[in-house]
Amino acid sequence: MSPLWPGRQHTLTSRLALLTMRALGWTPVLAPPPGPKFVAAVAPHTSNMDFWPGILLALAMRLPMHFLAKRELFTPPLGILMRALGGMSVDRRKAGGNFVDAVVAIINRETELVLAVAPEGTRSRGDYWKTGFYYMALEAGVPIGVTAFDWGRRQFGMIGYVHPTGNIDADFAEIRALLQDVRGRRAGNETPAFPRPADAGGPSRS
């Protein structure tokens, strides 16, 4: 059987999701989580094909996994599907228009949460990661779950955790070390795990 979120038992749905993952050649991975909430930095995200293994992973391990989307996407009928897949609406207006603060409020509200974020920000190769996910975790006081889409070994899941300290360069070095041997579906599209440099206007909370 696959690893499960702490306190969960397998259900028919989780067993079917696990069988589907294995039939597709995927192995789910879950390093023991250090707490009931964390921000899952999912990388490398290089292909649209990454989406469905992610849904299967959440079902197979019964993760309290969610992703963020603007509130306009949650009107019927699309909103029904978005919520069923784990989407969470973000209303920036309640945080004075600040996206990070709005997400921190969501993290603080939930008792269990795996908040999936793709910090590369694009499926094409970029120069650095967006850092909003980092500040969400830092300001909410939760770990970053380094979540690997490893197409080379056909493994997907949480391979380790980084506790943000405010020293963004040192914390990103830990993230890079965890992802060192991980390869995306299109390896040439991988964005290296470096925070936005000062000459590009960062580090930034976006």
Image (tube, rainbow, N blue to C red):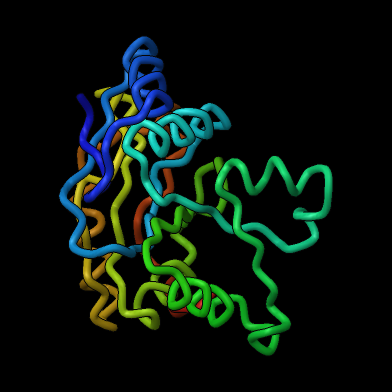
- Left or right of 153: which side holds 78? right
- In percent of width and height, residue 109 lies at 47, 75
Residue at (75% x, 49% y) in the render:
79
The quadrant the C terminus occupies is bottom right
Residue at (50% x, 44% y) in the render:
125
In this view of the protein, which residue sits in the foreground, 57 or 173? Answer: 57
- Left or right of 20: which side holds 132? right
Total numbered badges shown on the rendered structure: 0
Quarter occupied by residue 56: top left
Can residue 202 be seen by looking at this rendering? no
Compared to residue 36, the image places residue 21 above or below, namely above
Compared to residue 195, the image places residue 188 above or below, namely above
Residue at (83% x, 43% y) in the render:
77
In this view of the protein, which residue sits in the foreground, 200 or 134? Answer: 134
Residue pushed farthest right? 76
- In percent of width and height, residue 161 lies at 21, 59
